[in-house]
Every structure is written in structure tokens, then in C-alpha cells.
Amino acid sequence: MTGFREEFTLCALLAGTGAGRPRGPRSVGQGGEPDTVLLTDTGRTVTLYQVSDQKPLGSWTVKQGQIITSPAVFNYGTEEYIVVHDDKVIRIWKDSDANLDKAFKATLSADVYRIHSLPDHEPLVLFRGGSVRFLDMVLADPQQDVETILVDGEKILWSDMYVEGGQSVLVYITEILGEHCVYIWSSSPGISQKYKVNPYIDGSRTLGFSGSLKNKMFHLIILYSNGHVCHSFASLVQSKVENALTVSPLLQLEEPSDTGVVAVLDDSHIATLTELPSMQKDILCIWNTKFQTLQAVKEFPQKTSMQLWCNDNKMYVVHGKSITVIPYGCDPSCLASSLGKWRNIHTSALETVSFVNWDTLVDNAPEAKKSSSGGRKSARQRKTKPTVTHDADLAVLLKDIENAPESQIASVVQRALWGYEAVDFHITIGKIMQELLNRCRCDPNFYPQSPLVQLIQTNLLSYSLCPDLVALSLEKQDVRLLQLCLQHLPDIPESVICSCLKAFLSIGEDHLRNAPLSTEYILNYIEVAEEAEQPSVPDAAVIQNGFSPAALEEDSCDVQTPEIVSRRNEPPKSPVSVKRAVLLNSILTYPYSETFLLPHLKSLSASQVVLFLRYLHYLYVKCGSDLTINLPEKQMPSTNQIMDWMSVVLDAHFTVVVMLPEAKKMLQKLHKFVRTQMKLYSELNKVEGCLSELHRMKHQVKDCDRYSIEVLELY
């Protein structure tokens, strides 16, 4: 079925959105492997991501002062990455290269617009002057003269690479004084064919271009500001005269738009990303160009960067402060599957999804069929719960949420939860949550905590669907709701994770004491010290010039006082209370990207950093001392998670922590603990060698009698 699949977040963006649209990257291109993409930002960095795991596999950065001017691509022939910085400098590197400064470098004689690459074909270099060269020819003589095809003032707006009959074809579109031209370069003759695009309608602007190549005909798609999608065809057959392309209407969008993009998905489907001025929202649509029908539509609650990339049946859209991955599918075009979903422009995209109501079909069937199936129908109706899948029922629910007193909101939400078995239940839950949050924003005194908790626990919401939910919880200091958001909402960005961490570390104990948090799973695990949450200050008598050499050499002393021995034999105590530990564990177990978390962690205060590090140290010591604990996997952090968080916090605040007097004792403990672990692993490595030697000698022992004595010597 043609449509969108479940979306997810690839990564967060460091650049803020500001008041307007978010600032998107330069490109999201195909990586070397099927499940990877190359993300090129507008600054200095190229990052390779694994899409299914949303995990960065590698990152490369050019020097300070340099800037990437062309998106990075993958050379399938040599299995290398290529990028252009400062318009003329080409860098080529492999996965194993960690530093671009040591990578291959070639400085060209002319500015490069873009490099294109496809499997089984040599990459093509498109210069800003309009010339096209194979990459190997360019690298053979980087300072070769490059002719200029375009006239002064003519700029390239769009380009793409295709393959026709085993030959590489590059198409690019230019603009000069409001007029557009299409250049088609083919590797067979090695020259460009020029076509002038005739204006479509006076007063309309071109917003985006796309195209496809088949049977030596280039199919051009143009999106105009008046809402029209037009097309034209250009032949690859060379001609001595300049030809003109006359565009004809292909589709009519619902509203004109000042900004938008278009992308070809296959021979009969295209995608458009535009803004609906009447709703002030961006929508992504899949259209069937063969039957001119709308096949799928997706509405974005936040602004997009109006950029759309399509790779491997996935769309990549910059939505808010993150890049959203939207898988899609396009079935073969036929009339039965292309009836479309025409919608009212003043209604939400969620309201356009319709499902078959079999009860209605049975009621409208002929009387003979109704009488024969009446018994079965009645029995099934008695078993079916009432649902809220119909627009009328949902409209009543939303009206009740808008006007009902807060005391009655719980019953309204409970009535909606009766539709849990409905196919479109996630749509109902999303709309109800949005309506509740809208009312909370309009009325500061309105805060139905219990209904919000019920909706979160359905596991059908995501952060991108209701970003205001976490912000509202932080504003109300509702730690219970924040904990549930971290447990049930995917794709929470790193900046919000850090905001939750700051709230959990700074909130008062009086507030936590009254918070309805579940602590059963942790009571037998966390032992709270009497001086919990008070950073321990080293004794001034043992500090000399801010340094205590005795503390670092504690474990090497032959004589120890009874007080020190008894203190070491005591079990470790948690520096935070039980409820605060529950909240911090929800942070530690939430997935994140270190690259995007590190800048936000620097906003933590010194006291918060010290307290958090003390708790992480306590958890690590506790995990190392008690290997028999059996706790829920999603509620307690693993040893690797604890160490990862400790490392990233120290990376963000190492200078501050070193200079803090109250943190020196904790750093000394960390230093000694790490040194002890290193000794332990060193001894284990020795034992491993002995065991492997025993295993080898065991295979050499021949069959013996019933009783024998063997002496094995280990060196």
C-alpha cells in the first residue's frame, strides 16, 4: 500500500531553530552500505550514520576556518569518501582515516558546484561554470583549464546524476534574470545539450525541481508557487539548435505556497513538501502522477527546513531541531490503489485517514444478505466495545476536553480509551493529547495530571508528536510525568534530556518526598547515607597546597588505623535520596548521542556536576561489589551506561571539577578505583593465559588407563 510508515528520529541538530524555519544540513546522501547515510552540515563536519540504529559510525571535520561547499559523496569504485571545501579543494579519505588533514588533497583551478556518484560508475564533477568532468580526469591534472559554459550571472540551482544505456548522464538547471535552462550532459559525446524552459504562468515562481530518466527521455518536474506541479520532456538526442521546453500541468496542490520542494519517487509517484498558509503548517504528500491523486499526507506540528532527501525508500526531513526519517512505500500504479485521499484544506491531516466500517457495509447490504447474516452480526456487536474512530465521536470528545471542568477530564479520557482496539487508536490519542496541551497553555490553572499519565502509558505517543508535554512537565516540576516521558516517549532530543537532568538534580527534597514515584525496585539496592546530597569537603588538616599525597597512596600503606579499616569495610552509601536515584536512573537508561549531549551538559552547575558524579561513582562501585543483583533491565543502568555517562560528564566539566576543592576527594576515589580495576584486569589477563595453556595441553593428552597422575608446569 502506498503511504508512509512509522517515522523515527535520526539525530538532533546542534543549530537552533530561532524564530523562523530550522537551519538544515547541506545534504543527506547515500552511504557506502545500504543502511547508512552521509550527513554533511553547512559548516565543517561530515558524519556517517547507521539509519536503523540511529548511531553515528564516523565523523570527519575540516580545519577551523575552512568550510564545506559541496556535499560529501561515496565513491563506490574505490570505497572512499569525497568532499569539497572552500570551493576548489577536494578531500578523499577512507573509513579508517581519522583526520582529514592527513587525507588526500587536490586543489583545482575552478570552483566546484557539486560531485555526483552512483554505483558502478565513475563520480562526476560539476563545476560552477557548467563544465562536467570525470573525477579521475580531474585528479590526474587538478590545475587543468576548465572551460566556462554558462554566461555571466547564470547560476546552477539543481543537479542530479542518472544512468542510461550504461552511460553516465548529468542534468543541471540554471537561472538567469528569471529564466531557466536545462543542460543535459552525456558521457558518450561528452558535451551538454541546452534546453530553455518556457515560462508557465506570469507571476508564479519556481520552488523546486526534480526529474527522472527513461528511454533517453528526461522527465522534468517543476513545483510552482501558485500550487501547480508541471512537467516536460527533454530528449538526450543531440541537436545543433537550442530547443525550448513547454511545461504542462501535472498536478494541482491544495493551496499556493511561498516555499516548497518536490522529489520523484518512482515512475508514477512524486513527493511534495509545502506550507499550507491557511493552517501555518508544513505537509508532506505522496502523489500518483498517473492518476493525479493524493496517496498519503503527513502533517508536521513544527516547522521544517523545506529540504527533502530520498534514499532507499526513506525520506529525510529536518523537523524542529532534529532530522526525521520517514519510511515510505509505493505500490505499482493501478486505478484500484490510486483512488486517493482528497482532503479539506481546513482540516488536519490526521482526519483524512479513513478505515472501513464493516457494520455500515452490512447495514447497507441487500435485505436478503442482512437477514442471512443478522444472527452473526448481533453476536459480534455484543462483543465489540464502543470506539471513537468516527470523526463525529472524536469531535465530541475534543469539544468536551475543551469545555469540560478539570474534574471531568479524567472520565472523558477514559471514554476515549474504550477505543483501544480500533485501528486508528493512535490518531485519537494524539489528538486528545494535543487538545489537552493546548488548553494547558491557554489556562495556567488547568493541569489534569492523571489523564496525561493515562495517555502516556498507552505507549502510542512520541516526543515529536507532543513536544510541549515535556516542556509543560518541566514548568510544573512534575517529576512523575517527566519520568514517564523518559520511559515511554522515544526520540527525546539531547537538549531536553539535559534539561530533565538539571531538574532532577536541583529539585528540593521536600518536593520529591511528596512525589508519587515507584521505589519498590530500588529499596533493596540503594542505601542512602545520612549526609546524602551534601558534597563531602576534604579535611583541611590533610591538604597541603590543595593536594593530599597520602590520599592517593592510601592503598599502598602497610599500617592503617582501625578507623580507616572499619570505614573501608562499610558498604557504600548513596549520595542521593531513593526518589532522586529513581529519577536519575531514568536519565541514565535513556538512549542518547554523545556528540549532541556534550554541549548541553556544559550548562550544569558545579554543585550539580559533583553530585551527579558522586552518584555515578556509587553506582559503579555498587555494581562492581555485588554481581548477583537481579533488577529490571529498563529501570537500572548497566555498567557500560554508568561508565559512558561518567566519561561524558567529565569531558564536559573536567577543568571545573579539577579546580573544585569539594571534588578532589571524589576524584581521588575515582583515580584509586580505576587503578584497582586496572590491576584486577592485569591479573585476569595472566590467568587467561594460564587457562588457555591448560586448554591447549588438555588436547595433547593421550588416552590413558583407568588411573594416572599428570604434572603440568605453567611458566
Image: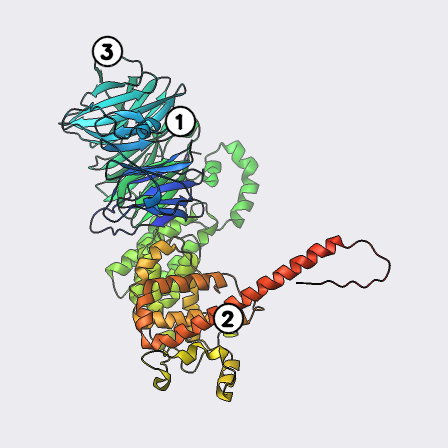
Q: Position of residue 450 (x, y in %)?
A: 39, 64
Query: Between tags 1 and 3, which lies in front?
Result: 1
| Residue pictured at 60% horizontal, 63% vertical | 686
Q: How is the image coloured?
A: rainbow
**Which quadrant of the rendered structure holds the N terminus?**
top left
| Residue pictured at 54% horizontal, 72% vertical | 625
Count residues near mark 2 (Cα–Cα under 10 Å), then give few for <14, some for 14-19, many for 20+. few
Q: Amino acid at mark 2?
A: Thr
Which of the 4 image quarters holds residue 314? Answer: top left
Q: Is residue 622 left or right of residue 703?
A: left
Q: Position of residue 428 (x, y in %)?
A: 39, 50
Q: Establish if 612 lies above or below 156.
A: below
Q: Amino acid at mark 1?
A: His
Q: Position of residue 381 (x, y in %)?
A: 51, 46
Question: Is residue 638 visible to us here?
Answer: no
- The numbered mark at residue 676 is 2
Mark earlier in primary sequence (2, 3): 3
Secondary structure under tag 3 reads: loop
Query: Disc 1 designates what residue?
Result: 121
- The numbered mark at residue 240 is 3
Q: Amino acid at mark 3?
A: Lys
Query: Between tags 2 and 1, which lies in front?
Result: 2
- The numbered mark at residue 410 is none
Question: Is residue 650 visible to us here?
Answer: yes
Mark earlier in primary sequence (1, 3): 1
| Residue pictured at 54% horizontal, 40% vertical | 374
For marks 2 and 1, give the CA distance.
Answer: 55 Å
